[in-house]
């Protein structure tokens, strides 16, 4: 059964009034509230982030990295909760395609994430209780608004680049649409300009699994001292399948049995894929808050950039001067290439400066997090070209 | 929330000692036990089935239809639990491709199904209690063994045809492999000779959702007077997504909102796809037993026909005289065409009489249950040809 392991819990961290270890934290008082798409206003609120490298004198070398659904701000440094290396430490770091010897990289925990930025597990200062479901539902645009307020606070006018995969890519597109003059270059990877019906369906299954867990307690589990670990683990298991391709599952696990020579004729994990999925579910609950999962999936479901611009996606990018590098993966069925192509089509219709790369890989959606050489070499080339165009000294200097 | 509706329950039916309304029921005493792949023996046991049409004097016109995971024996007549028409009533019936004016059609509830054939919700006559998890785990081959015992009981030596989709198609392949001399023609649709890693993964999510529901009570929910409706509904929701294609979800629902002009910024069903999935989950629990879901999904996971024959699928069909019509659907990602092609390749390697049709449709895996004209015309032609070959007067007589 799931969820019976409970080592250090992110909820415990949250209840300690979210001072995420080693993260920078900027608090905005009631005088700097965040206005949300729902009409609600959030304040006071806070945003947790990491930075890498040094901002140059002209403040022209800032790169914002946007993380995915269950990601975090530890893009290139150890996550203090899991002890794991930064989630994109082959992309961001000294000598990497996004070279922290040359660029000042910022990565913030998203709004309603659970690693320091205000979310449902945080205490609402007005009530003294965790927000729970009294937290307003937020959108991708709200996440980007929060980041923009941080960028203002850091005194940066224009970001050299905004980059991210999956939900991170949605934020990149939203940045380019909401603040075109503040984004010199944009790299949306394995993303799209809307969440599809199938994607909403998978998210809804996850949310229902969480809400079906009696330990969810109508969202008040922190106050009640319970944790909906089983529901959250099931949600993660379902989602995890969508991050891999049929082919990668076949190659990695096939029908291999788990530590046994024969079928057990029971309901234990006979197959390696079962054991792997259970492990994914069980470890996830130690690092992620169930209500955050509801809020962040909801933000993705609500994302439909064309709808913001009268139903025509090209209008989102009208007269944009941003240079785009759009990337998709052949075996990604969660955000298939067709979604990226729709973005590219709209960018072309807006006469944008856009390059598009479909990377051949069998790793599925999660390819953006993995060691895919073509992705790295493409981003390296794009970043170098964009740096030249902006007059920032680029690594190596040759290209 | 899910599962708060509970009209007439299949469990109530089960507890009334499973005398499924209007179904034929054959009981086998302890002297006719069913020997299972696990090594266990089941007996006494019973099998519930429906028949349509008339068996001819030579007993050469019998067609066995095998149903899918959550299917039933009501292939061409009203399901007494749901009140819905037969699940394949465009394929089987008077004037249909499998014409009940000419063929004697048998369809039996699978072993561990919950419509009359012995399964976990049934009372174990030895203990006087429902089997629950004391029911032995069964395989597709066990299901076919049970059917073969029924066919023996009906005095039929050779089936003119065995046909079915999805798990029904697995049974068709198993029939052809286990009893080649008893199958004149075989029609496996939207199936494969093994369950893939991705398919096992989705089933495991469903099982974990059920087992995470406290009302599952370790499988003893009947005795405890509870029903794991929420877990079962989540399992069904996850599975249902896999039965449709991305394209059909997009066409049917897209991002359309449910009875509302605007997003609600909450966790109710904003989108039609959410409402649809919740409905699928909620209605499913009224017709299906949670433990049956565990057992039947497990049987599918265990299916690997090649493994039974030393790892070479062609060996399953050595010197077969059966004529095969293998069919797949272009948009089926649960049992993609590649799985059917692997079967066809093995059949060709065994020099079998095989035709293969990949039907172009955007309806996904569930296409086999839907109104897909090319499927009907193909099956009609194949059945007529096979009838000629077997010397059964075929409908129309012209072909």
Image: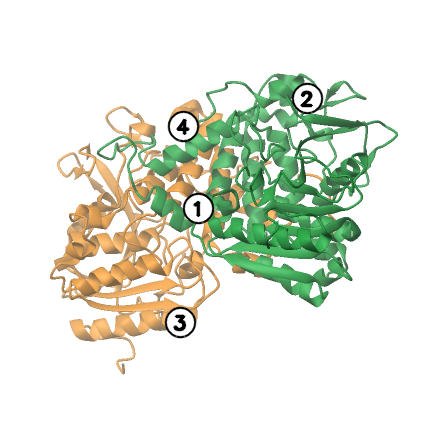
Chain colours: A orange, B green
Q: Quadrant of the N terminus of chain A?
A: top right
User: Mark 2 = which residue?
Assistant: B18
Of the residues under marks 4 and 1, which one precedes in the sequence?
1
**In this view, the mark in front (4 or 3):** 3
Q: Residue at x 71, y 47 (%)?
A: B160
Mark 3 secondary-structure assignment: helix
Q: Look at the picture and state if B147 lies above or below A273.
A: above
Q: Which residue is mark 4?
A: A222
What number is the disc on residue A81? 1
Chain bearing tag 4 is A
Task: Say which chain tag 1 marks.
Answer: A
Q: Residue at x 36, y 62 (%)?
A: A328
Q: Is residue A314 above or below residue B369?
A: below
Location of mark 3 (residue):
A374
Alpha carbons under labels 4 and 3: distance apart: 44 Å
Front disc: 1 or 2: 2
Q: Chain of mark 2?
A: B
Q: Tell whether label 1 touches label 3 (CB within 8 Å).
A: no
């Amino acid at each position: 059964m799931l969820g019976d392991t409970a080592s250090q819990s992110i909820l415990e961290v949250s209840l300690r009034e979210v001072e995420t270890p080693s993260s920078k934290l900027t608090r905005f008082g009631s005088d700097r509230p965040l206005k949300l798409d729902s009409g609600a206003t959030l304040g006071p609120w806070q945003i947790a982030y990491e930075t890498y490298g040094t901002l140059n004198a002209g403040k022209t070398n800032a790169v914002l990295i946007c993380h995915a659904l269950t990601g975090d701000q530890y893009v290139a440094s150890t996550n203090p909760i899991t002890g794991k290396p930064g989630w994109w430490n082959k992309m961001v770091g000294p000598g990497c395609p996004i070279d922290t010897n040359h660029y000042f990289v910022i990565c913030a925990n998203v709004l309603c994430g659970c690693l320091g930025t205000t979310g449902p597990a945080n205490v609402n200062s007005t009530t003294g209780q965790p927000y729970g479901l009294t937290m307003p539902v937020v959108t991708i645009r709200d996440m980007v608004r929060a980041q923009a307020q941080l960028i203002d606070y850091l005194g940066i006018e224009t970001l050299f680049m905004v980059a991210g995969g999956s939900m991170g890519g949605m934020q990149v597109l939203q940045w380019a649409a909401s603040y075109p003059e503040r984004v010199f270059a944009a790299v949306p990877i394995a993303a799209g300009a809307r969440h599809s019906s199938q994607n909403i369906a998978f998210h809804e299954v996850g949310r229902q699994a969480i809400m079906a867990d009696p330990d969810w307690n109508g969202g008040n589990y922190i106050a009640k001292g319970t944790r909906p670990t089983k529901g959250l683990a099931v949600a993660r298991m379902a989602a995890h399948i969508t991050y891999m391709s049929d082919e990668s599952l076949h190659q990695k696990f096939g029908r291999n049995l788990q530590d046994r020579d024969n079928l057990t004729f029971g309901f234990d994990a006979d197959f390696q894929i079962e054991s792997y999925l259970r492990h994914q579910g069980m470890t996830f609950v130690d690092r992620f808050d169930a209500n955050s999962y509801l809020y962040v999936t909801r933000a993705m479901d609500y994302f439909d950039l064309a709808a913001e611009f009268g139903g025509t996606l090209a209008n989102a990018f009208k007269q944009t001067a941003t240079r785009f590098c759009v990337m998709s993966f052949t075996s990604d069925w969660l955000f298939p290439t067709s979604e990226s192509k729709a973005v590219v089509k709209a960018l072309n219709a807006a006469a944008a400066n856009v390059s598009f790369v479909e990377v051949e890989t069998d790793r599925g959606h999660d390819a953006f997090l993995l060691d895919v050489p073509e992705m790295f070499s493409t981003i390296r080339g794009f970043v170098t070209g964009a740096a030249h165009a902006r007059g920032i000294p680029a690594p190596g200097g040759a290209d």
